[in-house]
Amino acid sequence: MLTAARRTGLGVKMVGSGHSFTDIAVANELMLRPDRLVGIRSVDRDAMTVTALSGTPLHVLNDRLHAMGLALHNLGDIGQQTIAGAISTGTHGTGGFWASLSAQVAGLEIVTADGAVVQTSTSRDVELFHAARVGLGALGIITAVTVMVEPAFTLDAVEQPLRWDEAVDRYEQLVSENHHLDMYWFPHTDTMLVKRNNRAVDSAQPLSSMRAWVEDELVANTIFGAVNRLGNTIPRTVPWLNRISARALTARSYSDASHRVLTSPRRVVFKEMEYALPREVGITALAEVRGSDRTVVVGDQLSRRDPVHPRRRHLAVDRERPGVGLPGLPRQRADRPHAVLLGRRAIAQGVRRAPPLGQAAHANRGGPRPLLRPLG
């Protein structure tokens, strides 16, 4: 098919699950789908690697690895992506030695534009390997991915709301004491949701099926989706909705297989952007955004005033969770719009349609220079 497309001059695009927030998966001419490229091709327990076909969804791969007593070292928040799509678009988690899924890749099988099947790895065609791991599909079609694995493990999860000042003061301590750390700030409030995941030595003690359904499905998806649709429809309610949501947060703790802790069910449609900052300046940047002149980003008109704080004005951005919005972006459809804060300088640059300034609202730990990423 690739050879025929090359002869006729057609562009070819292999898509994954469609999770990416950009139009990277849009195929203007010939689209290929990896629906039949699913499953595990081989397992090498000596090298502790597993080779999976490129269209294998992460949740399928995780379940099959778990059944063999194996696990990936780290995961992002979503389990519906294909393994090839997840690495190609830079999907990452937090903490551990390798926060990014692409860092756990040991080899790739790629079909190039001339129809050749190329095997590349950490020791073979190394330059192509490093470029293709997060290659956005530009270097060929990935048909198989070899990932490093380790023995299955359990994570202890502790989730609790903290006041802004306490979370910021304890940030370095929380980073150093936990394997995985997530911090979610709720704009218009002084609340952060802090999630800590650590490797456990005891057996798993998961949430009861009823509690998991109520908290992760009914509340976090059904009700939360409805609340955010209200915010989309009536933007002036967003500050109030954020405050209500923050007050509703409660602490919980449980332990389960690593992939069941690191990934979450996501039924709410949203869009987001991510910007990375060195960890050492992350909290400072977030504090500056929070402490800027309190301009609120929720509507689609620069002149719209916040009914709660009349001196504040609005810009157009929607986000999955409380995050940092950016001027100069088109309005994005989402079911989780949360207001964010920017300053006058940002507004001026947004009016001139300057490039986004950057954002930061989700701290992550891992590696010698861990990064700060936004929510979602």
Image (spheres, rainbow, N blue to C red):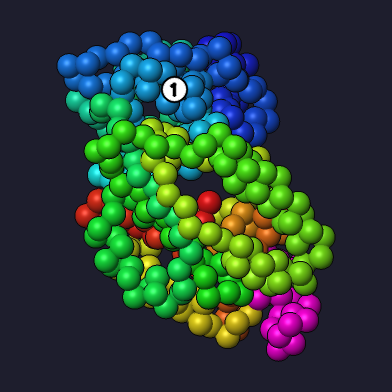
| Location of the N terminus (image quadrant) | top right
Q: In this view, does 172 lie above or below 290?
A: above
Residue located 57% across and 42% down the image: 211
Q: Position of residue 28 (x, y in %)?
A: 68, 30
The residue positioned 71% from the left and 50% from the top of the image is 223
Identify residue for label 1.
63
Identify which residue, 10 or 177, lies in the foreground: 177
- Disc 1 crowd rating (10 Å Cα; few below 14, some 14-19, many 20+) is some
* Residue drawn at the location 33% of the way across and 11% of the way down: 42
Q: How many marks overall?
A: 1
Q: Identify which amino acid the numbered label 1 is placed on.
A: Asp
Residue 345 visible in image: no
Position of residue 14 measured from the top left corner of the image (x, y, whole percent): 56, 25
Along the line of sight, which residue is nearer the eye, 96 or 198? 198
Q: What element carries label 1?
A: helix
Res 162 visible: yes
Q: What stretch is highlighted in magenta?
A: 296-318
- Indicate yes or no whether the magenta region holds residue 212: no
Position of residue 329 in the picture relative to residue 34 (left or right)? right
Q: In this view, does 9 lie above or below 183?
A: above
Furthest residue in direction left, as rendered: 46
Q: In which quarter of the image is residue 320?
A: bottom right
